[in-house]
Amino acid sequence: MKKKSSSIRIIIIFLVSVMFSKLYSQNNEILGFIGPSFHFNFDKGGKMKFSGGLEFSGWFVDNVRGPGCLGFDVGIEFEQGKIRLYSEAQYGLIVGASAGPVLQYSFSDKKICTGFQTSVWLSIFLGGEIRGRFMQDGIYYSPGVFVKLPTNLGTIRLPF
């Protein structure tokens, strides 16, 4: 029962983060980016494992306020023996920060693990980030790099 309630919490947090981003936008104009990411994941003991993934980010650009705009990302990441799905609400332009839920499956022990991650990043198509991941099985520090190419989404009407 605990696994089911954790998954429901992850889904609720994802929907709230996208809805929060949507409240910031007036015309639903989304600028999208997609590309690969690569991270070096260190646990508390300093043991490192490499991961690679694919991430899509959407930015509500019709109502930029201050030094950036609100957006969200959705990603999948592969590490030896593990697969992670995540989504984050984010704010920024060239420099930014993001935070959101993570769902991880371990193939070796066939367990689902949930958690939360946050990151700070610097990017103009090619970027770098420092990510902190707080999972049920431990805390991880993950510096990484990514490439994002723009996608032409135009104006998208979201159902909320």
Image (cartoon, rainbow, N blue to C red):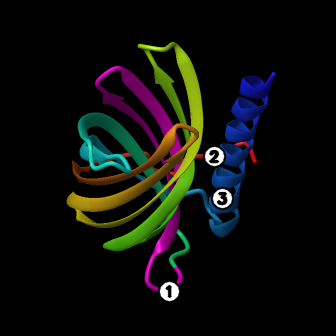
- Looking at the image, is 126 positioned above or below residue 108? below
Q: Are marks 3 and 1 in contact (CB under 8 Å)?
A: no
Rendered image: mark on residue 45? none
From the viewer's perspective, tell me whether residue 86 is left or right of residue 114. left
Q: Position of residue 78 (x, y in %)?
A: 33, 28
Residue at mark 2 to residue at mark 3: CA–CA distance: 10 Å
Q: Position of residue 85 (x, y in %)?
A: 48, 33
Q: Earlier in the sequence, mark 2 or mark 3?
A: 3
What amino acid is at disc 2?
Answer: Arg
Report helix, strand or loop for mark 3.
helix
Residue at mark 3 to residue at mark 1: CA–CA distance: 17 Å
- Specify whether residue 158 is in view: no
Residue corresponding to mark 1: 66
Residue corresponding to mark 3: 22
What amino acid is at disc 1?
Answer: Gly
Q: Are marks 1 and 2 in contact (CB under 8 Å)?
A: no
Q: Are marks 2 and 3 in contact (CB under 8 Å)?
A: no
| Of labels 1 and 2, the one closer to you | 1
Which quadrant of the view contains residue 55?
A: top left
Q: Which residues are magenta?
A: 65-89
- Tell whether position 78 is magenta: yes
Q: Earlier in the sequence, mark 1 or mark 2?
A: 1
Residue at mark 1 to residue at mark 2: CA–CA distance: 24 Å
Which quadrant of the view contains residue 9?
A: top right
Q: Residue furthest bottom?
A: 66
- The main secondary structure of the magenta stretch is strand
Report helix, strand or loop for mark 2.
loop
At 44% from the left and 84% from the top, the residue drawn is 67
What amino acid is at disc 3?
Answer: Lys
For the residue pair 15 and 2, the one nearer the viewer reads as: 2
At 49% from the left and 44% from the top, the residue drawn is 138
